[in-house]
Image: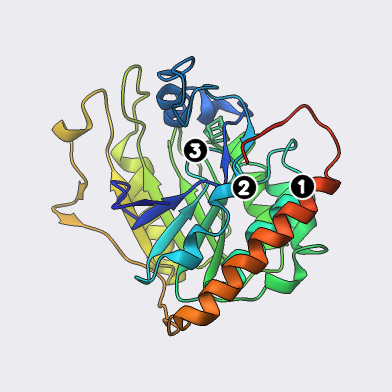
Amino acid sequence: MSQGSTIEWTDATWNPVRGCTKISPGCAHCYAETFSERFRGVPGHPYEQGFDLRLVPEKLAEPLRWTKPSMIFVNSMSDLFHEEVPDEYIVQVARVMQQANWHHYQVLTKRSQRMGSLLHAKLRFVERLGHIWWGVSVENRKHGLPRVEHLRNSPAGLRFLSIEPLLEDVGRIDLEGIHWVIVGGESGAGARPMRKEWVRAIRDQCADARVPFFFKQWGGVRKSDHGRMLNGRICAQFPCVTTQPVLAKEQRLIAISDVEAQWCHSLGQLPDRSLQVIA
Ligand code: SF4
C-alpha cells in the first residue's frame, strides 16, 4: 500500500494488480503506463516488467496491516476488472475489503460490464457494503455513458463516476442511483483541453440531483499553472461516511494469515494465462 497519495480524492493507493492494456480514448495518456514503463528492465524494481499485467499477491493483505482508517484507491496502477485478472483473484481482493472494513475503498474501472456481472454473481457477498465504493470512468459520450448504465444496473452500496479526463461535453447524465461524481481534466505532456462549460454543466446536474461533486483539477501540460478552483472556490464534496472500529491486533493477524492461506490455495488453482505472478 502506498500511503499519502497525491491524488486529491483519496488517502492511499493499494495495487494488488499491476499493469493494464488500453481500452478507450481516456487511456491515451495513461499516467500508470507512463510511470511503469519508466522502470521497465530495472532489476528488482516493482515495475521491472513495465506496464505488463501481473498479479501481486503479496500485496493482498496490506489493508489489514494498516491501522489508520483511510480512503483507499484500489488499483491506481491497473484495472481490477481487466479480462486477464482471474475471477478468483478479484474475489480475494473483495474478501480483504470486506474484512478490513475500517477503511473505505474506491474501486474504479473502465471494464464496467465485467464488474457488473461479478457483482451479480461471485461478488454478491460484498455488493451492498457501504465502505466499498464501485465506480466507472467516463471520458466521453460514446465510451463513458454506457459504463454509467452498467454501473447503475449493478447492485452496489455506493456508486460513483470519475469523469476524467473529460474530453467533450457529455451532455445529460442520468444520475439516478449515482452517489458521487468526480470531474477532472487531463494533465501532462499532450494533455487534451477541457472547457469550463463542460465542467459547469456537470456540476449543475449534480447540484440538481443532490449528488456530491468533487472537482479535481483543470489539468493541462503543467497542471500546477491551472489549479482546481471552480468559480473561485474548491469543490470537494464526498459522500457521507461512517467509520468502523479497527480490528484488534490478534484478530487482524488471524485475518492476514487467512488471506495469505486463501490466495496461496487459489493461485494454485488458477488457469495458466501466462500471467506473471510475483509471490
Ligand atoms: S484502463 Fe486505466 S490503467 Fe488501464 S490503460 Fe486505461 S487508463 Fe490506464
Q: Which mark is residue 267?
A: 1
Q: Is mark 2 within 8 Å of ligand 1?
A: no
Q: What residue did someone put label 3 on?
A: 77
Residue 177 can be seen in this image:
no
Determine whether 197 is above or below 13 in the image.
above
Rendering coords of residue 258 (x, y %): 66, 68
Amino acid at dot 2 = Pro
Which is in the foreground here, disc 1 or disc 3? 1
Q: Quadrant of residue 167?
A: top left
Left or right relative to 262: residue 101: left
> Is the C-beta separation of discs 1 and 2 under 8 Å?
yes
CA separation, marks 1 and 3?
21 Å
Q: Secondary structure at mark 2?
A: helix
As rendered, which of 21 and 225 lies closer to the eye?
A: 21
- For the image, the number of numbered tags is 3
As rendered, which of 177 and 189 lies closer to the eye?
A: 189
Amino acid at dot 3 = Met
Quadrant of the picture in which ligand 1 is shown:
top right
Left or right relative to 96: residue 248: left
Q: Secondary structure at mark 1?
A: helix
Q: What residue did someone put label 2 on?
A: 57
> Is the C-beta separation of discs 3 and 2 under 8 Å?
no
Q: Quadrant of residue 133?
A: bottom right
Q: Report the colour scheme.
A: rainbow
CA separation, marks 1 and 2?
9 Å
Q: Determine the residue positioned at 35% across, 36% down.
A: 185
Rendering coords of residue 71 (x, y %): 40, 63
